[in-house]
Image (cartoon, rainbow, N blue to C red):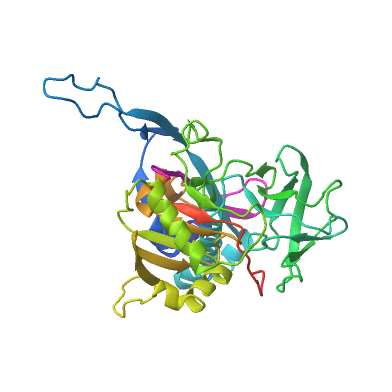
Amino acid sequence: MAGLGIDSANLAFINYLHVIGQTLNQKALLRNLISEERWAGASREWRVHSARSPAIGFTVDGGAFPVADKQDYQTAKVARRFLAAQIQLSDGAISAIKGENAAISAVESEIQGAMTGALKYFNGVNYRDGSGVMAVVQTGTSGTTLLADDARMLWDKASFDVYDTTLATNRGQIKVLRTASAPTAAGYATVTLEASVPGGTTAGDKLVWANGAQNSLNLAVSGLDKLVDDAASSFQNINVANFPRYSSFVLDNGGTLRDLTPFLFRAMLAGIKQKSGNERPSDGLKVLGNSWSLINVEELYEGEFRISPSDKVAGMAVSSFQSALGKIDVIVDTDALYNKMFFVDFSQIKRGVVQPLSWRRQGGEIFLRSDNAGVNTATMLEISENYIMNRYTSGKIEDLNEDKSTMY
């Protein structure tokens, strides 16, 4: 029986298109937690309440009323981001496929690989700050080995641009060969490269996700580390220094790591309640952190937090407890940033979608023949951006001490 052509592969592929976006949205934890909102155009604007009206006060019988005033609003704005991914089948692979079932199996294999990578990538970048930085160089800045603070996004065969700490100077590009599973004594990842580290690379330099000649510097979606923050800079078109209420409650320790304690946890809850002006999150708070941080909550502080998950819970299995802010769900995510813990009011965070994740078609086909090589490529594209309406009902704890046992 002759092998199938690219047209047959396309037909088999199309049969499974409907499950791809649904699977990504359901299984990528943050995409599941962040509600989706459709919008059109290159950007989205809305108004943020920055100050209350002072036209209120006591008077006397027959006295003057307060002078009318308006509440102050600022215009927030976000721009769309483009995320793309590709999979390929070679002419030889397609011609070797015998029968429709085999074609479906081959395509399923490619889809599964693409979805697995996309799930990891989506979840990883949705915790970061939108700069495209995936890790920070520590030591070992010469030869074919370097140490990085985080290896979960340093995938084998992936390329990264090495930038200085200010993201102003591009020192060159590296390609990861492999990453050791065990961390060093200092908790860093040992990364082996295909070639030598670019000249001038030093501790503190940042590794930015690259896709050939196109890197992701400042092109990634805004993750929790950007959405939930108190940095005194412009964010979503609003100057945070001028409007400090438009920021999250953050507990840091000046870069010095410290252990998580019940007091620190409760101080965060109290701070969010106070900063929000008694505006309790309508859906409660989700506490997100990596395995090494939140296992302490589950094991060490169970008594203090009164964790008592229901035995009739639907959906993801999480520990929860009641507080002055209502229900608190504690969610462990292997992709959450190291040394940080997020306390998030997801009722205020949206994923604005201009174009949902979909496969680009030409003449009804997804796999397109290359004119330069014997391969057939399918490309998926999403146009979206994460944004937050009110930041003061969320917060984060930084500079947490962790004892990692694996870098994966």
Residue 351 in sight:
yes
Seen from the viewer's position, the closer of residues 262 and 99 is 262
User: Where residue 202 appears, x then y in whole percent?
Assistant: 82, 50
In-front residue for pair 291/269: 269
In the shown orientation, is residue 389 left or right of residue 150? left
Q: What's drawn in magenta, residue-wise?
A: 369-391
Number of numbered discs overlaid on the protein picture: 0
Q: Residue 42, percent across and down?
A: 45, 32
| Residue drawn at 50 percent across, 78 percent down | 299
Q: Is residue 336 left or right of residue 47?
A: right
Q: Quadrant of the C terminus?
A: bottom right
Q: Is residue 200 left or right of residue 133?
A: right
Which residue appears at 43% of the width and 45% of the height?
391
Q: Residue 318 lies in what quarter of the image?
A: bottom left
**Main secondary structure found in the magenta portion:** strand
Name the side, left or right, on which 392 lies relative to 398.
left
Residue 379 visible (yes or no): no
The one nearer the camera, 13 or 315, is 315
Q: Quadrant of residue 182?
A: bottom right
Q: Residue furthest front?
A: 60
Residue 312 is one of the magenta-drawn residues: no
Q: Position of residue 19 (x, y in %)?
A: 39, 62
Q: Outermost residue, bottom direction? A: 311
Whether the magenta-drawn stretch holds residue 376 is answered as yes
Query: Residue 155, percent across and down?
Result: 66, 62
Taking depth in this image into account, of 129 and 106 the one nearest to the observer is: 129
Residue at 24% in and 29% down: 57
Q: Quadrant of residue 152?
A: bottom right
The residue sitting at 52% across, 57% down in the picture is 6
